Amino acid sequence: MLLPPINGGLSGTNFYMDTVVFTCDVGYDLIGDPSSTCQADRSWSRNVPSCSDIDECLNANGGCDHACTNTAGSFYCSCVAGFTLNEDRFSCDDINECNFGNGGCQHNCHNVIGSFQCSCMIGYELSADGFACCVCVA
Ligand SMILES: [Ca+2]
């Protein structure tokens, strides 16, 4: 009896004139002949095909907003810094850092797409760390 290709399967029996049909798992392309027939001399008419991983990222970036990473049998999307992957696993939304501990800003936090900025109340100056506010020393 033939063995199925790696990452695939087969159906059928190995009696004379029987045809075995090969399939590949989701995320794999079948390379070769999809079926083989048992012949009178007990050999098979075709070689077992192989199952090759589909690089989903090559086609329209896999549908990902930002980064697409191909994996064996699948792929996944990820987002650049400052963005979070939505529940649809494809699209990326800006993270409003100001909603989390005021973004670490001592006074005011301003969300911008992909980032955020701190600012200080009148009479204060933003310190070099970009978060703390200090009294202006002229
Ligand atoms: Ca893949």
Image (cartoon, helix red, strand yellow):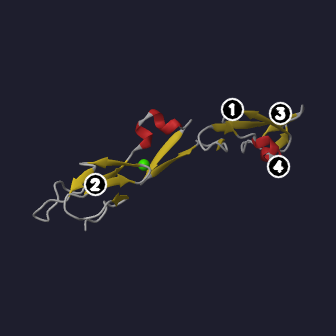
Residue type (three-letter) at the residue carrying disc 3: Ala
Can residue 53 be seen here? Answer: yes
Which residue appears at 14% of the width and 63% of the height? 43
**Of labels 3 and 1, the one closer to you:** 1
**Residue at point 59% right, 40% down?**
90
**Alpha carbon of mark 1 to alpha carbon of mark 4: how far?**
18 Å
Upstream in sequence: badge 1 or badge 4: 4
SS label for mark 3: loop
- CA gap between label 4 and label 2 equals 53 Å
The x and y percentages for residue 117 are 74, 36
Among the two numbered marks 1 and 2 on one chain, the one whose residue lies closer to the N terminus: 2
Labels 3 and 4: the sequence-earlier one: 4
Q: Nearer the viewer, mark 3 or mark 4?
A: 4
Front disc: 4 or 2: 2
Q: Give the residue pinned by disc 4.
A: 101
Q: Secondary structure at mark 4?
A: helix
Question: What whole-number distance in Å separates the C-alpha atoms at marks 3 and 1?
Answer: 34 Å
- Residue on which the image places disc 1: 113
Measured as percent of width and height from the top left, residue 86 is found at 66, 42
Counting residues from the N terminus, which is met first, the one under dot 3 or under dot 2?
A: 2
Q: Amino acid at mark 2?
A: Ser
- Marks 1,2: beta carbons within 8 A: no
Question: Which residue was labeled with disc 3?
Answer: 138
| Quarter of the rendering containing residue 119 | top right
Residue ID for mark 2:
50
Please say whether residue 132 is visible from this viewpoint: no
